[in-house]
Image (cartoon, grey):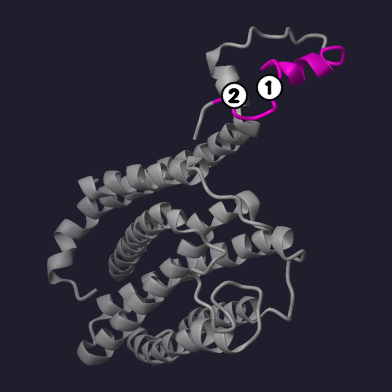
Amino acid sequence: MSIWKYVVLIWLTVVIIAGFLIEIPKIAILEETARNLFFHVPMWFTMFATFFAGMIYSIKYLSNENLNDDLKAESATQVGIVFGICGLLTGMMWARFTWGTWWTFAEPKMNLSAIALLIYVAYFILRSSFDDPKLRARLSAVYNIFAAATVPFLLYIIPRQLPSLHPGADGNPAFSDMTAPELRIVFYPAIIGFFALAYWLTNLRYRYGRLKNVVADL
Amino acid sequence: MKISSNTTYNPPADSIIMDYSDKWTGVMPEDPNAFIQFMSSNDLIFVVLAVSLIIWFVLVFYLVRVDRKITAIEEKVLNKDLNNSEV
C-alpha cells in the first residue's frame, strides 16, 4: 500500500479529532451541531467531485472508446452515490434537531438533492440493461454527461432562487453570519481528506472491475 | 479545548456506577483513574469522539484489508494478462 494512503488515514483521523475538540463559538439553534459542517458538507462536495470525474471519464470514453475509461466513470459515479447517501442521511439527522423535522417537502435543497441521487441511480439501472459492453459503455456515457449537467441546477442554481432554511439558499452565501470563520480551519482540510478517500475508494472499485473483466475473459 | 474544570459539571468520575451500584451488585465502583476522569470531563464529549474513532478505525482496517487483497489478486492475475488484454 503506497504512502499517500497512510497520509489520508492519518489526515482524516486528525480531522475527526479536531472536528470534535476545537473551540467553536456558540451559535443559536446550531449549538454543537455546527461541527456537522466538518462532516456533512464534505460529503456533498465529494459527491460533486466524483460525479464530475465520472463525467470526464464518460467524455473520454466517447472520444477514445477505451473500456477502461467506462469502468473509471462507473467506479467514480458509484462512490459518488455512496457519499451522496451519506450526505442525505446526515442532513436528515441534522435537520431533525435544528429545523424540527426529518424531511420536509418545503425544503428545496433536500428534495432536489434526493432527485439528483435518483438521476444517478438511473445510470446504474441503465447500465444493467445491456449485455454488450460497448453498447452499454456508449449509452451510459451519454446518459452520465446528461446526469452531471443536471447537478449544478439541482443543487446550486434552483435552491438559491427559493426560500429555504438551508444555508446557501435564498441568495445568501453558505458561509454567512451563521457560520463562524474559525470553522473553516477544520472544514477545508476535511474536504481535502474526503476527496482523497473518495479517490482511493474509486481506485479500489476500478481495480476490482478490471480484475472481474480479466477473470470473465479467461 | 480545556481538559477540565471550566464546566459546572464536576461529579466524581464514577458517579454513574455509584447511582446504579445497588442494581449492578457485581460491579465494584472502580477507582477513577486519570483516564476515567479525562473521559468524564467536558460533558462527556470525549466519549462521543471515542465512539466515532472506533467506527472510523474499524472502517479503516477493513478498507486496508480490501486494498491488500485486491493487490494480491492483481499480482496473481494481471501481471500475466494485463499487457495483452483490452480490458
Which image quarter: residue B35?
Answer: top right
**Highlighted magenta segment, given as a residue range:** B4-24
Picture residue at 37% right of the left edge, 87% below the top: A141
Decide which of tag 2 and tag 1 comes sooner along the chain: 2
**Secondary structure at numbered mark 1:** loop
Residue A175 placement (x, y as % from top left): 48, 68
Mark seen at residue A55? none
- The answer to whether the residue labelled 2 contacts the one labelled 1, judged by CB atoms less than 8 Å apart, is yes
Question: What's under tag 2, amino acid-wise?
Answer: Ser
Between residues A209 and A27, which one lies in front from this camera angle? A27
Q: Which residue is mark 2?
A: B5
Q: Quadrant of the C terminus of chain B?
A: bottom left
Residue A54 visible: yes
CA distance separating discs 2 and 1: 7 Å
Residue that carries the numbered disc 1 in the rendered image: B10
Q: Chain of mark 1?
A: B
Q: Residue at x 53, y 62 (%)?
A: A179
In front here: A111 or A156? Answer: A156
Residue that lies at the very extreme toward the right in this rendered image: B22
Asked if B53 appears above or below A202 in the picture, the reply is: above
Q: Is residue A53 above or below residue A10?
A: below
Q: Is residue A87 above or below residue A143?
A: above
Q: Main secondary structure of the magenta part?
A: loop
